[in-house]
């Protein structure tokens, strides 16, 4: 019995050290070396204070800011501890109610905008944390943002253009714009004269 118990205990300790200490340390070191910004949270600072992350969306509902995608993490939006999609199918009445509610909010914030609403402004992302919207969704909101801030539409459009990121590695996904970065740039704008 002792002869088989000792190797089992040694194996347990060895595997615990390898998978619980060595492997996480190596993965963390490689992550920090290769993806240093992402591995440390991709925090965005303003005036020396962390205001958010480039990887996790935030709730914006003031008309003077760009609004991001809806968050499926409930009850608190953009809660990274409960990241998941809503799993609502196209025939689910809850999805229809969510879309109608967001359409009403967009219309109330800018009743003169008659352009078609981009789908990413009325649906949540797969993770519920997406910090990006499409350039079309940003362009849809630009007149409202410009009017609410008292700046020119050209100034707001320039912020969208400057912050538009292309496809990942030039082939994956679609062009996108980080909502937090655009909103921080808006806060630095001077009103049009």
Image (cartoon, helix red, strand yellow):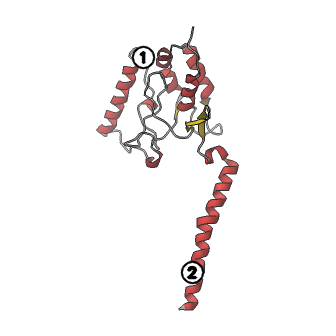
Which label sits on residue 9? 2
The residue under the point 59% across, 66% down is 19
Residue 109 rendering spot, x and y as whole percentages: 40, 20
The residue under the point 62% across, 68% down is 18
Question: In the picture, residue 15 is in which quadrant?
Answer: bottom right
Residue 138 located left or right of residue 88: right
Q: Is residue 67 above or below residue 16?
A: above
Name the secondary structure under disc 2. Answer: helix
Question: In the picture, residue 76 is in which quadrant?
Answer: top left
Q: Residues within 10 Å of mark 1 (few under 14, many from 20)?
A: some
Residue 68 located left or right of residue 74: right
Q: Is residue 30 above or below residue 109?
A: below
Name the outermost residue toward the left: 93
Residue 189 located left or right of residue 92: right
Residue 151 rendering spot, x and y as whole percentages: 54, 14
Which label sits on residue 180? none
The answer to whether the residues at label 2 and label 1 have Cβ atoms under 8 Å apart is: no
Looking at the image, which is closer to me, 40 or 109?
40
Name the outermost residue toward the top: 193
Name the secondary structure under disc 1. Answer: loop
- Identify residue for label 1: 113
Question: In the picture, residue 170 is in which quadrant?
Answer: top right
Indicate the quadrant containing the C terminus: top left, top right, bottom left or bottom right: top right
Q: Nearer the viewer, mark 2 or mark 1?
A: 2
């Amino acid at each position: 019995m002792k002869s088989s118990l000792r190797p089992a205990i040694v194996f347990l300790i060895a595997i615990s050290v390898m998978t619980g200490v060595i492997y996480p340390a190596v993965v963390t070191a490689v992550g920090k070396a290769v993806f240093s910004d992402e591995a440390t949270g991709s925090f965005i600072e303003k005036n020396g204070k962390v205001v958010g992350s480039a990887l996790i969306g935030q709730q914006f509902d003031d008309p003077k800011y760009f609004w991001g995608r809806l968050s499926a993490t409930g009850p608190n939006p953009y809660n990274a501890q409960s990241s998941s999609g809503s799993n609502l199918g196209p025939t689910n009445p809850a999805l229809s109610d969510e879309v109608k509610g967001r359409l009403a909010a967009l219309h109330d914030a800018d009743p003169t905008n008659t352009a078609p609403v981009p789908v990413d402004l009325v649906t949540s992302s797969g993770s519920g944390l997406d910090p990006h919207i499409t350039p079309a969704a940003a362009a849809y909101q630009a007149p409202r943002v410009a009017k609410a801030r008292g700046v020119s539409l050209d100034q707001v459009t320039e912020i969208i253009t400057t912050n538009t990121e292309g496809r990942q590695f030039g082939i994956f996904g679609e062009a996108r714009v980080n909502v937090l970065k655009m909103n921080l740039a808006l806060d630095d704008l001077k009103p049009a004269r």
